[in-house]
Amino acid sequence: MEKSTIIGVFGGIAAVGVGMVLKGADPSTLINPAAFLIIIAGTIAAIFNAFTMEGLKKVPTLFKIIFCGKKIISKQEVLELFVSLAKSAKHEGVMAIEKKANEIEDPFIKTSLSLVADGFSADFIYETLEDEIKQMEERHRAGALIFSQCGMYAPTLGVLGAVIGLIAALGNLSDIEMLGHSIAAAFVATLLGIFTGYVLWHPFSNKLKQISQAEVEVKKMIMEGALTLQSGASTMAMEAKLQAFIPASQRLTKKAEENEGK
């Protein structure tokens, strides 16, 4: 479960609700089916116009990542794996790498180790893995773009909803008592549009970009490990190469844990 998303969503709702009460506005005015229809259905319609069905099929998966997170192998695990492989390769040769490649479930690590075990050159391994990372980045960018576009359309549809509400309110000026309520209800669509755009859709897009960046960093670390392994480097050289991908504070923490264990 991605706790930060849950905190953000409910925190945003609470902030608006409490803010309305403190300002003297009635939160019950938010119960406006017409406004929800214009904003939610309108945003969905705009997204269908903007993207292909192939791209939109990924939306449920993207929501799952936003609310549940995505399991990514840690940098420390990558470091330990490749240091262990470098040690095994010194004693058992290519067979140790090939054996590990068959045991690994992660597709990218499996591909990396298979390329090394099959004896491909460093240039070929680099180009192959780099292309795979770039393709992944492009897929992730396309997914984040869906939510950033939602964030752009929703506030504009909020203005459209307010205009529709004002047309309805001003079309019947005979009931002066209801005029104020009608005008207040008209701006509910604007509120919903701005709220969903800047509290939900744009932040969701940003979260997907951050998750993607974290995955890219891990994959680049794996690629560096594969290239170092291909060069036949020692375990110390492997560790020195891959430590660069781990923040200094985390390296110190890990070292302290190891010393405490001893």
Image (cartoon, grey):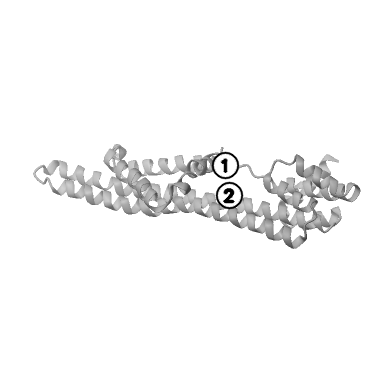
Residue 196 in picture, x, y percent from top left: 39, 47
Nearest to the observer: residue 86 or residue 7: 86
Mark 2 Cα shell of 10 Å, populated few (<14), some (14-19), many (≥20): some
Is residue 176 toward the left or the right of residue 134 in the image?
Answer: left
Point out residue 238 in the picture as x, y percentages from the top left corner. 81, 55
Q: Is residue 90 above or below residue 26?
A: below
Q: Is residue 74 left or right of residue 29?
A: right
Element type where label 1 sits in the image: loop
Residue lying farthest right? 91
Q: Is residue 247 visible?
A: no
In 3D space, how far apart are the residues under numbered discs 1 and 2 (Cα atoms)? 8 Å
**Residue position for label 2:** 211
Q: In the current view of this chain or complex, which residue is farthest to the left?
A: 174
Q: Residue 65: x and y, percent?
A: 54, 42
Q: Which residue is mark 1?
A: 69
Mark closest to the chain's N terminus, 1 or 2: 1
Task: Write the residue at 38% across / 44% down.
Answer: 16
Q: Is residue 138 above or below residue 165?
A: below
Quadrant housing the C terminus:
top right
The kind of secondary structure element at disc 2 is: helix
Q: Amino acid at mark 1?
A: Gly
Tell me, yes or no, whether the two marked residues, 1 and 2, touch with CB atoms within 8 Å.
Answer: yes
Type of amino acid at the residue the image marks with label 2: Ile
Residue 129 position, x and y percent, is: 68, 56
- Asked if residue 30 lies left or right of residue 109, the reply is left
In the image, is residue 185 above or below residue 232? above
- Assign the N terminus to one quadrant of the image: top right
Looking at the picture, tell me which residue is in the foreground, 2 or 116: 116
Give the camera-side residue of 186 and 127.
127
